[in-house]
């Protein structure tokens, strides 16, 4: 019997519904099919609930606790609704955890879902978002230069780009591409923001040409890239870009292939991993049992596959594949939530996933 400790951070908005859904599916999968694996779920405070209990949106017990476990499920949350004293210091638990653990690599896959209406042709690509610096860097924020008001009428925002961080995310991009269709697209804005993006673009090319000669490389400005994605999504394989551009592009492609509610992601530094839906806390639909839990479920699948490779535990891959197949099957057969035009509630969708779990031959 192998025991895996999985952290659970519910967050706000639809967080408790979609994270809770993933926990239920994991429990049911092991109970029904994989008794040799046990998941031990450990809840950690984060966000609003944690402000109420600890006067802190991300207390030390959470950070220290996460150091000792195998991986965790991170719910979405909305830090802009925090009380002033927590907001002013730019406390964003997700950004803080990425910074604290240096989870520099955010892997965000997108592909068509049979049975859903896609706005583009065939799509199967990964957006690799550099998580540790660029224009959304918590590292800058901590130095106090990330964003500030120069006067009450003038705001200043800066970004940081370092060779070291670009090199490591480039290696990730090319490694991912080597296991796929061997194409990497670099997205930047070197024509306007010269120093930062010439460095980003040139270091990516350098890493690729020197170490991964089999991989085909091209690059686009961020504005042109949005047009290319809409026009010819099928041509892209791995897309590597900086923090803010990666955030924006992922919402675009999430909707292009069907719904934001289908978009998973994994944040990792090679040693630790945090599963997290690409979207936010969706306060407009929170607490109504109508959110699409697929994004969180497929993020959980990504975490299981990552753990499987790390711990050489094929059974984790087996669980991941069972869940992934069940999700694709029920969506293809027409059980969908409201964002995809269906009428299933979050809990009905999850029940259908559990009923469709089958051993993969
Ligand atoms: P953040 O800054 O935290 O990323 P955001 O402003 O990008 O937040 P989201 O919370 O991602 O906004 O929501 C954008 C839209 O997508 C909302 O209308 C929301 O209801 C919808 N949405 C997001 N996630 C889901 C989901 N899992 N199921 C259904 N609809 C969703
Ligand atoms: Mg967003």
Image (tube, rainbow, N blue to C red):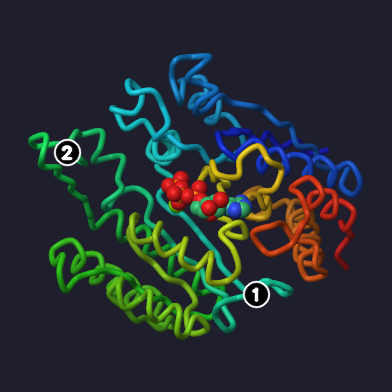
Q: Is residue 153 above or below residue 298?
A: above
Judge the density around disc 2: few (<14), some (14-19), many (≥20) Cα neighbours within 10 Å: some
> What kind of element bears circle 2?
loop
- Picture residue at 63% right of the left edge, 74% below the top: 112
The label shown at residue 117 is 1
User: Number of labelled discs?
Assistant: 2
Residue 343 coordinates in the image, percent (x, y): 76, 57
Answer yes or no: is residue 267 visible.
Answer: no
- Picture residue at 77% right of the left edge, 44% below the top: 26
Judge the density around disc 1: few (<14), some (14-19), many (≥20) Cα neighbours within 10 Å: some
Q: Which residue is mark 2?
A: 145
Whether tag 2 and tag 1 are in contact, CB under 8 A, the answer is: no
Q: In front here: 247 or 307?
A: 247
Residue 230 coordinates in the image, percent (x, y): 45, 79
Return the disc, 2 or 1, that comes first in the chain's sequence: 1
- Picture residue at 20% right of the left edge, 65% below the top: 199
Residue 137 coordinates in the image, percent (x, y): 30, 45
């Amino acid at each position: 019997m192998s025991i895996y400790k999985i952290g659970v951070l519910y967050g706000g908005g639809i967080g408790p519904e979609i994270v809770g859904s993933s926990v239920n599916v994991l429990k049911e999968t092991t109970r029904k099919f994989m008794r040799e694996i046990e998941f031990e779920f450990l809840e950690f405070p984060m966000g609003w609930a944690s402000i109420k209990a600890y006067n802190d949106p991300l207390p030390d017990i959470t950070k220290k606790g996460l150091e000792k476990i195998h991986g965790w499920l991170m719910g979405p949350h909305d830090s802009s609704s925090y009380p002033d004293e927590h907001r002013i210091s730019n406390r964003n638990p997700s950004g803080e955890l990425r910074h604290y653990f240096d989870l520099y690599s955010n892997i965000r896959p997108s592909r068509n879902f049979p049975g859903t209406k896609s706005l583009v042709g065939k799509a199967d690509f990964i957006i690799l978002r550099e998580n540790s610096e660029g224009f959304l860097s918590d590292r800058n924020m901590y130095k106090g230069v990330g964003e500030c008001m120069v006067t009450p009428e003038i705001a200043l925002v800066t970004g940081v780009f370092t060779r070291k961080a670009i090199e490591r995310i480039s290696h990730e991009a090319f490694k991912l591409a080597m296991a796929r269709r061997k194409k990497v697209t670099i997205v930047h804005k070197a024509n306007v923001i010269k120093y930062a993006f010439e460095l980003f673009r040139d270091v990516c090319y350098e890493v690729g040409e020197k170490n991964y000669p089999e991989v085909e490389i091209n690059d686009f400005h961020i504005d042109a890239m949005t047009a290319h994605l809409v026009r010819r999504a099928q041509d892209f394989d791995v897309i590597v870009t900086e923090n803010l551009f990666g955030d924006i592009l992922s919402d675009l492609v999430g909707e292009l292939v069907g719904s934001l509610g289908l978009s998973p992601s994994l944040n990792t530094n090679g040693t630790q991993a945090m599963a997290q839906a690409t979207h936010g806390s969706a306060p407009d639909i929170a607490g109504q049992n109508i959110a699409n839990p697929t994004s969180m479920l497929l993020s959980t699948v990504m975490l299981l596959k990552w753990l499987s490779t790390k711990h050489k535990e094929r059974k984790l891959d087996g669980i991941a594949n069972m869940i992934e197949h069940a999700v694709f099957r029920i969506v293809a057969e027409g059980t969908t939530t409201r964002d995809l035009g269906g009428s299933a509630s979050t809990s009905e969708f999850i029940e259908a996933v559990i009923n469709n779990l089958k051993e993969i031959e």
